[in-house]
Each structure stands twice: as C-alpha cells, then as structure tokens.
Image (cartoon, rainbow, N blue to C red):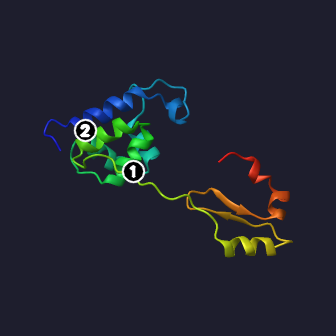
Amino acid sequence: MSTNNELGEFLRARRAQLRPADVGVPELGYPRRVPGLRREEVAQLAGVSIDYYTRLEQGRLSPSRSALAAIARSLRLNEDQENYLLSLACHGGIRRYRYATQKAGEQTLRLLRQLRDTPAIVIGRHMDVLAWNAPAEALYLDFAAIPP
C-alpha cells in the first residue's frame, strides 16, 4: 500500500458520496456527524468487523481480495472503481469468474417428475430456481413465467 494512504482516502471519499437511503440503511432521525455512510455502516454491509474496516481506512492492514470485493459491493462501486480499489491495495485488477449456467441434471428432472404428490424445487448455487415439479408450481407459482 502507498505510504500516503490513497486507499483510505478513496474509501472515505466513496463513503461520503453515498446516502444511507442509497444502500437501505434507515435514517434514525437525528443529525449525522459525517456526510454519507458511517464506517460501521459500511462494515456491516460488507460483513466485516468495524475494527477491520477502520484499520483498512487508516492504512494499518493489507486487506484480502474477498474483503475488498465485499466492501466494493457495499460501496456500490462500478467495475472501474473496483479495479482502482484493488490496484490501491496492490491486488492488481479484478478477475471476474464466469460460471457456466447451472442446470438440473437429467436424473434430477426424472426424480422431480416422479414426485407427483410432493412439491419439490431444485435451487442452484446462486439461489436461483433450476427446476420444479407440477405440485410446486401449483403450490407456489408458475416459475416459467418469471424472467431469468
């Protein structure tokens, strides 16, 4: 990391640009001392401890790639901003992994067809509905009518 803490400056600047309402944080009705989000709000949104995020902003630790990705999501960074964040933290550019579209296998589909009295749904790794049977469609909704 650079000695003048460009990473911390970038995080503080981006944090100041976001309003709590932008990320779903409720307003509590009293005046805020900082413009934008507080450190603890960013930490909570990113799933890291407040101490971790504070030390990161102060330039006192070298963050992991996964922590930076979570912070980038919580600060609503676009791809260029996320690349910049990673370069400031000496992680280089972003690596986007493209996974093949997940599908239910033929054996799973056969099993679903055999379950005539029990609603069943197959959920993928990203919590998307991959397959379902007729009782599930009758009980919940027509999953085919929902756009991907």
Q: Secondary structure at mark 1?
A: loop
3D distance between C-alphas at marks 1 and 2:
21 Å
**Residue 70: horizontal and vertical position, in percent?**
41, 48
**Residue 51: horizontal and vertical position, in percent?**
32, 48
**Residue 81: horizontal and vertical position, in percent?**
34, 35
Front of the two marks 1 and 2: 1
Q: Label 2: few (<14), some or many (≥20) within 10 Å? A: many
Q: How many marks?
A: 2
The numbered mark at residue 96 is 1
State left or right for residue 96 relative to residue 139: left
Q: Secondary structure at mark 2?
A: helix
Amino acid marked by disc 1: Arg
Q: Nearer the viewer, residue 117 or 6?
A: 117
Kindly identify the residue that appears in the image at 45 percent across and 54 percent down: 98
Kindly identify the residue that appears in the image at 24 percent across and 43 percent down: 87
Q: Which residue is mark 2?
A: 7
Kindly identify the residue that appears in the image at 83 percent across and 63 percent down: 134
State left or right for residue 8 relative to residue 145: left
Amino acid marked by disc 2: Leu
> Which residue is farthest left?
3
State left or right for residue 68 relative to residue 129: left
